[in-house]
Image: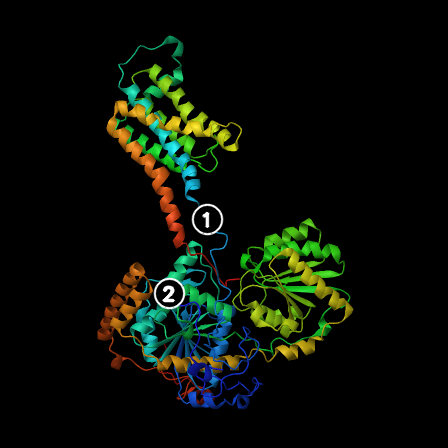
């Protein structure tokens, strides 16, 4: 892998048109694409998003998949989502605007990730890909075994593949070494990779030994209408610091446990409002007990996504203590609600907000305390901009429509690339993934290919029913919806 | 901008590593500063050969200790059975002597060599102290098993006291040596290793093997370690 690369002049020159049109207000008409987008949007893709993580599970990946899919539907593409069954939620479901979701009966192993054997999901996923006439398979999250499986099968079936990595990972411990090897194998013949920040791109390129040219950076977005400021709901007689995060080690809850007593001792009018649940809750409870801060540190427990905004607007300062973060949605949400944001300078966080909107500190108690002190004194002197002004500045930074437009270009580019034939793929695996892992996965690719031939003999493609398009150019969702009856003759 | 933007004039604005600004570069643009913040091999300890050899001497010493113990064992085992010394006829020695008498000899030797090997592996080389959690019980077990192969209680007792010297008290002395309270180290190590000479009189082949093992341990292994240091590639990357 080359550690430093520079794109050729021709390619750099190809990119000069500034993205001039302002990010979309919420009407489709304002989405009028620029020249390049108009040319590319002529081709409509059939996209299958695959990830273990989807609604009813809640989190960054889940909302990313949902919002991105909705915006791609809006742009006229056909999108289906494949995930594993969540309890009673099995089979096919339709979400807003005909977004079709396959909840496949795959066994969950750990942390909502399915068990993988590399082969057993092929019949099901082939069914989805064939019946829905999928052209692009877009897998999400390196923690999702189903995403890895789907990429593997899609390549066997000759489909174009795109992968989005949502998280940063280390290099040193055993689990990282294994996951990184798996990622190397998965990504060595994937057409295009998307990362959520430049730091995440560097991380992924290193982990999977990739050519950085096939890795695009497309950030996450927040819906600004969900996070509006409301200065009336906060108590200005005191200063409230809000923390909304899962209470786990990666989110730096131990740091928070060090900050609370130090600042509470110095500022008698300081309150902490902490939303979220997790194994590190005990740390905060102990601190609260030890320093008798029950009236000043409120632990709200797990929050629904819809309640997050109501918690955020009660505070003056938003604090994020994460130890590692690819792209921190939480600080964008906090700033979008008009709060002053204090965060650790780790991972992709410095790229997310402009310096005037965020105070960055080193991930130590003393540095975070110093950062908070300066913001508190600014808050007291009234020299901070009003929440509405901050909201106005943040609301257009990250929009899902912009993200979808950029992702569409990734699909266009991925579709121009050839899908490797089996011999080429075997060669790529052996040359990129080392002798041992390369040979093992080459063997598995061959087995997978034979399994696919068997399935093609067992259920020939021409005998499989095509699913009726609920979205995309030939969508019949709207008319059947208007008639008030289901026209789907294949109730799965 | 997307990945496949159309042609035009080269962008005038320099690229910045920020996401909040729409920049006139494609999403898959790779800047010159890509991976600039990557750091390699931070705080890696650079070993020097003779320093490693000195440290490896400790491991060699322990191997010699085990050899000493085995040697004494073999010497004892080859003697004729003596009469029971009344003054030394402690009951616990007798118990030791008969505890594993019904186990076959092959098993006893296999078990004891496994245990001595385990003792060598788990010995706390960095901090030799009598409080060794794992290595002490292992060689105690080895001793128990071997005790039944000795011809009499006297031998068992002698063996026990010898083992105590070699395995329980020797690490104490070693600890003092290392903490600098007793300065004997240079002379003492060859002393231990000179047992090779003693062994040679009894079993020349074994002496040769032990000598080879000691040489590999003290000279070849450190060389390998120092040599492999060159291939160390520890990434302290953009993980945050």
Is residue B204 rendered to the left or right of residue A240? left
Q: Which mark is residue A278?
A: none
Q: Is residue B211 left or right of residue A54?
A: left
* Above-or-below relation of A485 to A203: below
Residue for point 46% across, 65% down = A203
**Is residue B201 positioned above or below A135 on the image?**
above
Instruction: Sort mark 2 into few (<14), some (14-19) or many (20+) by Cα contacts within 10 Å.
Output: many
Q: CA distance from mark 2 to mark 1?
A: 30 Å
Residue tagged by mark 2? A184
Work out which quarter of the rendered image holds the N terminus of chain A and state it: bottom left
x and y, in percent, of residue B15 in the image: 53, 77
Residue appearing at x 75%, y 72% in the figure: A383
Residue B107 in sight in this render: no
Residue A124 against residue A43 in the figure, above or below: above
Host chain of mark 1: B
Quarter of the figure with residue B220: top left
Nearer-the-camera pick, A370 or B160: A370
For residue B46, the mark is: 1
Q: How is the image coloured?
A: rainbow
Q: Nearer the viewer, residue A475 or A296?
A: A296
């Amino acid at each position: 892998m080359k550690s430093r690369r520079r794109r050729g002049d021709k390619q750099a020159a190809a990119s000069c048109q500034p993205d001039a049109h302002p990010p979309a207000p919420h009407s489709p008409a304002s989405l009028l694409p620029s020249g390049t987008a108009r040319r590319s949007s002529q081709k409509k893709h059939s996209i299958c998003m695959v990830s273990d993580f989807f609604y009813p599970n809640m989190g960054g990946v889940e909302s990313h998949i949902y919002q991105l899919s909705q915006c791609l539907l809006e742009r006229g593409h056909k999108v289906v989502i494949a995930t594993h069954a969540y309890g009673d939620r099995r089979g096919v479901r339709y979400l807003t605007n005909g977004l079709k979701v396959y909840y496949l009966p795959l066994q969950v192993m750990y942390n909502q990730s399915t068990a993988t054997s590399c082969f057993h999901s092929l019949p099901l996923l082939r069914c989805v890909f064939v019946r829905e006439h999928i052209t692009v398979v877009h897998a999400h999250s390196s923690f999702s075994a189903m995403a890895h499986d789907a990429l593997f099968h899609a390549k066997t079936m000759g489909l174009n593949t795109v992968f989005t990595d949502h998280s940063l990972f280390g290099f040193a411990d055993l689990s990282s070494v294994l996951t990184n090897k798996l990622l190397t194998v998965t990504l060595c013949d994937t057409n295009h990779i998307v990362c959520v920040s430049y730091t995440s791109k560097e991380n992924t390129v290193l982990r999977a030994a990739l050519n950085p040219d096939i890795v695009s950076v497309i950030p996450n977005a927040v819906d600004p209408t969900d996070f509006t400021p409301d200065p009336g709901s906060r108590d200005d007689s005191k200063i409230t610091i809000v923390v909304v995060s899962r209470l786990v080690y990666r989110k730096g809850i131990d740091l928070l446990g060090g900050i609370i007593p130090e600042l509470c001792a110095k500022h008698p009018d300081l309150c902490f409002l902490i939303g979220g649940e997790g194994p590190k809750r005990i740390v905060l409870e102990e601190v609260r007990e030890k320093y008798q801060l029950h009236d000043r540190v409120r632990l709200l427990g797990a929050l629904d996504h819809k309640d997050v905004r109501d918690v955020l607007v009660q505070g003056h300062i938003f604090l994020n203590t994460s130890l590692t973060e690819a792209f921190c949605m939480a600080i964008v949400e906090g700033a979008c609600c008009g709060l002053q944001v204090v965060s650790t300078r780790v991972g992709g966080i410095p790229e997310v907000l402009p310096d005037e909107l965020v105070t960055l500190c080193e991930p130590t108690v003393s540095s975070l305390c110093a950062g908070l002190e300066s913001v508190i004194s600014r808050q007291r002197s009234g020299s901070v901009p009003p929440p509405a002004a901050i909201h106005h500045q943040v609301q257009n930074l990250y929009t899902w429509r912009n993200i979808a437009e950029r992702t569409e270009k990734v699909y266009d580019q991925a579709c121009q690339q050839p899908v490797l034939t089996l011999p080429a793929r075997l060669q790529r695996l052996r040359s990129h993934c080392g002798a041992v892992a390369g040979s093992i996965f080459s063997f598995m690719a061959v087995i997978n290919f034979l399994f696919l031939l068997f399935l093609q003999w067992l259920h020939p493609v021409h005998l499989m029913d095509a699913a009726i398009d609920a979205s995309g150019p030939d969508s019949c969702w709207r008319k059947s919806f208007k008639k008030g009856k289901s026209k789907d003759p294949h109730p799965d | 901008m997307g990945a496949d933007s159309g042609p035009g004039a080269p962008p005038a604005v320099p690229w910045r590593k920020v996401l909040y600004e729409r920049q006139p570069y494609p999403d898959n643009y790779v800047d010159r500063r890509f991976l600039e913040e990557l750091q390699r091999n931070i705080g890696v300890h650079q070993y020097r050969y003779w320093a490693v050899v000195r440290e490896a001497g400790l491991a060699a010493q322990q191997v010699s200790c085990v050899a000493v113990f085995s040697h004494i064992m073999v010497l004892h085992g080859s003697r004729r059975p003596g009469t029971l010394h009344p003054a030394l006829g402690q009951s616990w020695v007798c118990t030791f002597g008969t505890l594993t008498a019904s186990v076959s000899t092959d098993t006893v030797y296999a078990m004891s060599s496994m245990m001595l090997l385990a003792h060598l592996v788990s010995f706390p080389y960095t901090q030799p102290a009598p409080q060794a959690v794992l290595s002490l019980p292992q060689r105690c077990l080895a001793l128990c098993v071997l005790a039944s192969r000795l011809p009499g209680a006297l031998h068992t007792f002698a063996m026990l006291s010898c083992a105590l010297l070699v395995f329980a008290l020797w690490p104490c002395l070693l600890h003092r040596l290392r903490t600098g309270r007793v300065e004997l180290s240079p002379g003492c190590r060859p002393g231990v290793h000179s047992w090779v000479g003693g062994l040679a009189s009894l079993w020349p082949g074994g002496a040769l093997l032990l000598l080879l093992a000691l040489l590999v341990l003290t000279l070849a292994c450190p060389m390998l370690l120092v040599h492999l240091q060159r291939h160390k590639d520890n990434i302290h990357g953009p993980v945050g």
